[in-house]
Structure formats: structure tokens, C-alpha cells
């Protein structure tokens, strides 16, 4: 089993920045890919960014050039640096991990709220 705990959410003005963190524990060796998803109010959960164990990354078109996903394997921690935030980035952000690089979803964190005010 893998446990994921997110932190770093909060309220920020449009144009501002936030960094989300996700601490992983448990059977870390079973993880290949990690990623961030988000669920805006009243909408379905969507993939934001993924990163493989080797460092390959993919981003949703809506966040390309503004968000950066990274991982520190020594600390078993995943990050999401979010810059130039927009009100439409408001959502609950979830950390996830698993074997599928394109949609890691075997393990989930509890979510952290990000609210961007206009």
C-alpha cells in the first residue's frame, strides 16, 4: 500500500503562485508514475500533470507553461509549482500514483483546496 498526503493549497489572487506538495509513504517501489488531478466545483476530475520515475512529464493544455510538476525521489515527495494562476484553476487538487504513466490512479491523496480569486 502507498499513502499520499497533499499540502500547500490555499487562497491566492489571480496571477499569483502556489506550490503543492505530496508526501508518499509505504511500498514506494511499486510506484512508476505520479500525477496531479483536479476537480473544479461541479465538474469532473481532470488530469493536470504526470511524471514518470525517469522524469518524463505530460501536462494538460490548460496548464502548459504555467505549472511545473517535479519529484524528489530521495524525499518521496511530488510537487506542483503553479504560476500565473487563474480563477478557473480553482479546484480540489489530488495527488495520485500508480503504474499507468498516462493516468496514474492506483493510489490517491485526500485532496487540497486551491482557490484563485479574481
Image (spheres, grey):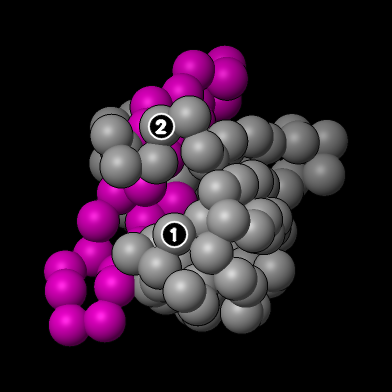
Checking the image for residue 57, the label placed there is none
From the viewer's side, name the closer residue of 22 and 58. 58
* Residue 52 within the magenta-colored segment of the rendering: yes
Q: Is residue 9 left or right of residue 38?
A: right
Q: Nearer the viewer, mark 2 or mark 1?
A: 1
**Residue at which label 2 appears:** 64
According to the image, label 1 marks what residue?
Answer: 86
Residue 85 percent coordinates (x, y)? 52, 56
Residue drawn at x 16%, y 69% is: 44
Image position, residue 57 (x, y; %)? 46, 24
Q: How many marks?
A: 2
Regarding residue 49, the answer to whether it shows in the image is yes
In which quadrant of the rendered view does residue 108 lie? bottom left
Give the mark, 2 or 1, whose residue is nearer the N terminus. Answer: 2
Q: Nearer the viewer, residue 44 or 31?
A: 44
Residue depicted at x 64% and y 34%: 70
In which quarter of the view is residue 16 placed? bottom right
Indicate left or right for 111 with 62 as reference: right
- Circle 2 packing at 10 Å, graded few (<14), some (14-19), many (20+), is few
Residue 4 left/right relative to 57:
right
Query: Compared to 13, does 85 lie above or below?
Result: above
Give the vertical position of 29 relative to 52 (above or below): below
SS under mark 2: loop
Instruction: Report whether 112 appears left or right of 107.
Output: right
Q: Is residue 46 above or below residue 73?
A: below
Q: Which residues are magenta?
A: 36-59
Q: Secondary structure at mark 1?
A: loop
Residue 109: x and y, percent?
Answer: 50, 69
For the point 41% across and 32% down, which residue is it?
A: 64
Amino acid at each position: 500500500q502507498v499513502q499520499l498526503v497533499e499540502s500547500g493549497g490555499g487562497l491566492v489572487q489571480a496571477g499569483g503562485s502556489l506550490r503543492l506538495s505530496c508526501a508518499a509513504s509505504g511500498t514506494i517501489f511499486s510506484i512508476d508514475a505520479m500525477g496531479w488531478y483536479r476537480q473544479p466545483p461541479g465538474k469532473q476530475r481532470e488530469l493536470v500533470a504526470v511524471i514518470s520515475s525517469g522524469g518524463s512529464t505530460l501536462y494538460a493544455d490548460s496548464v502548459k507553461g504555467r505549472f511545473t510538476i517535479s519529484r524528489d525521489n530521495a524525499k518521496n515527495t511530488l510537487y506542483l509549482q503553479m504560476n500565473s494562476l487563474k480563477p478557473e484553476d480553482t479546484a480540489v487538487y489530488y495527488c495520485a500514483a500508480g503504474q499507468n504513466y498516462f493516468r496514474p490512479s492506483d493510489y490517491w491523496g485526500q485532496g487540497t483546496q486551491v482557490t484563485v480569486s479574481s
